Image: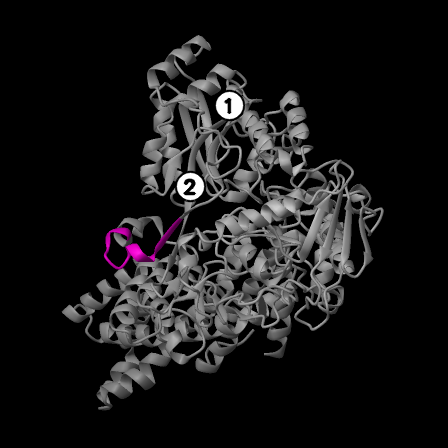
Amino acid sequence: MLKRWLRNTTMATVLALAPLPAWAQETPKQGGDVLITYKDDIATLDPAVGYDWVNWSMIKSLYSRLMDYTPGTPDLVPSLAQTFDVSPDGLTYTFKLRTGVKFTNGRELVASDVKYSIERAVNPKTQGPGAGFFSAIKGYEDVSGGKATTLEGIEAPDATTVIFHLSRPDATFLHVLAINFASVVPQEAVEAAGGDFGKKPVGSGTFVLKEWTIGQRLVFERNPDYFVKDMPHINTFTVEVGQEPLVALLRLQKGEVDIAGDGIPPAKFLEIKNSPAGAGMIVDGEQLHTGYVSLNTKIKPFDNVKVRQAVNMAVNKERITRILNGRATPANQPLPPAMPGYDKSYTGYAYDVAKAKALLTEAGFPDGFQTVLYSTNTDPQPRIAQAIQQDLAAIGVKAEVRALAQSNVIAAGGTEGEAPMIWSGGMAWIADFPDPSNFYGPILGCSGAVAGGWNWSWYCNADLDKRAVAADSMSDPAKATERAAVWGKIFTDIMADAPWIPVINERRVVAKSPRMGGSDKIYVDPTRVINYDAIYVKQ
Amino acid sequence: MALLIVRRLVQTALILLGVAAITFLLLYALPADPARMIAGRSATAQTVANIRRELGLDQPLLVQFWTYLQGILQGNLGRSYAQKTDVGALILARLPATLILMAAGIFVEVVLGLILGIIAALRRGGAIDRMVMMASFVGVSAPQFVVALLLLYVFAVTLGWFPMSGFGTAAHVVLPAATLGILGAGWYARMVRSAMIDVLNQDYVRTARAKGLSSARIVLRHALPNALLPIIAMIGIDIGQFMGGVVVVEAVYGWPGIGQLAWQAIQQVDIPIIMGVTLVSALAIVLGNLLADIIAPLIDPRIHAR
């Protein structure tokens, strides 16, 4: 008995939701050339390697994967897959591929390409950051340990069938097949590029890379053979790199640029927002992000849960949202509101200086203590750290703010006994995929509380780890709601131990010209930021 | 002359070796882990360990340095950690932009500096002199970021005479070169002024004047060549500085120079790129000085190339 439920349900959801978004009212026009700017150069377009928020959305559009998301939503849909089935024990996933899909080098995409691509992403030689996402596939340890180059858990019995055998149930597996690291690439092109595939990408996505002048521009052209009709909408998009956000904004105001990818510099935000022409340029979208302060449970006095709870009550989160010109909302739990499992009824630790002081006294620190708060050194993060510093001073905690380059803060967080508190701004957790488990393992689970890890609280609760494993074994799609609730409970239970001060959920801001069409949700897409497939130029 | 060049080239090699060793050691002493930066947030400990091994970061520091040196001797600057591309190719791709901005910037600062310096020297103590010296003081003290944005706002945004950012046509180079030139001209103006004042008080200048030569001829043929030496030495230094990248100007004008590359690499702890840019700019400083030393005797025969 195979389950077709998920496939049917997701399709039904998509169909039911389709008329809802406002942009669907207006028929997107085909055509148009769009100019986008970014400050940083594009590091790589190799889907097994690229892992920053700028190249993430470009890689999404250059390649296709078995699964994808409906634009502007966190809803999974089959993409290269025509249909799929999950076995009752959640250990076998069988995919039937669409036929007639072609790579942009002209060759037809077949099942063995899927197998090759995932093996390549896991192979240590690729130096891919995403290898661990595939750890549920049988034979993963052998490949990542360098003992094998093929995953015994992926079968391609014929050109259109891919079967995955998992060593443990993984309720996030369909999401895993939708992340960039699972993008399908043609082996011959990877080999022909001779280690430079990141600059000479070949895929089967909505766009083809036409030109790359290093340090200056990348030109992406519509893939006329893309397997979904009328996708994408625009003919080309050109990415100009090395553009200072302030200058990009000036160019946008003059009509030279269509999308300023880095958004609006904090210092200019209010001016633009309050100008008549400016308001229409701002796209302000919710993303799966939580900014927090980690409280290192291995450093005194944060080993005391009462101290952690006390500082949780001391931070005035409303004031921090004002520093960000209202581009954020106060948070009270690790999960962001848009994530399944977010507990609306949970109130967390309300801002209460008197109570915080009382709790500190109870913990044996009536006069507070001295500590260090790390932060990255780019605006506005040091200002937020200073606000937290002031809040802490109000309960007698004297925190020295140490604002450093991002890489140094990350290194301090991953060194045992080094950083008592870290304000995560500029490095905060943004979900890889819209599933609550993604907010646990590396940042709050025992596996992340290791040297070089991202669990900067060094919080390890074996009982919660067990519950997390149990929740991720609930791969029966019929239990998705139940599973989300289980996860939600894990996160609110974590807050009883208060290893974090959840501070804010920050929205992402992109600035676009009035001629660009489509809902805000495809400019700040929860799974890819700018969705180049869905944006269009107005008539 | 040939001997000088050979000796200086040997010195250059030694200097580069020293620069390479110091930079290498400093970069690895940083409390930042390149493998961790590449691996990102979700990577498992094993993935990080795999990346570290593939990059050779698990080797002892001396072994890593030796491997790097061997690469350099074969003309191989290594591969970028983050971009997985040859560093040499990345630097080469940005070299034309860097060279153009360097040449244009130096041209503007030297021409402006010479004109202002000579005028100030001829009108020493007068109102013009004081104005020029004040302006040069403002010029050398003004932050690049402010001047760059100011020029951009006036000449690109408001007047629309020049493109706001980018690279490609002659119009693109005007504002970045003007920014560098205006800021650098102050140094040159001050140096030209004091050198000229020195020379104008010499006996031979008085003699020339007594012969009835026009003052333009006195300044350009008799005085200026003798005042040029420190300027040439300064150009040599500027070549090196501009080759290392002028990060702020490049950032404001979206100029695809080496500075942008280095700046991003530093943030990503992309050590091969940082090393490569450092070596290229060290090489440029040494060669710039060598060039100045070779040119000096051609202008002033009293100096012998030794």
User: On what subunit does the disc labeled 1 rest?
Assistant: A
- The relative height of residue A107 versus residue A169 in the rendered view (above or below) is below
- Image coords of residue A227 (percent x, y): 62, 65
Secondary structure category for the residue under label 2: strand
- The relative height of residue A93 versus residue A448 in the rendered view (above or below) is below
Q: Which residues are magenta?
A: A273-284
Whether residue B26 appears in this view of the structure is: no
Q: Could you say which is closer to the camera, residue A351 or residue A424?
A: A351
For residue A282: magenta?
yes
Kind of residue sitting beneath label 2? Glu
Quarter of image, res A476: top right
Kind of residue sitting beneath label 1? Met
Whether residue A135 appears in this view of the structure is: yes
Secondary structure category for the residue under label 1: helix
The quadrant of the rendering that contains the C terminus of chain A is bottom left
Residue under numbered circle 1: A495
Q: Is A121 left, or right, of B296 in this rendering? A: right
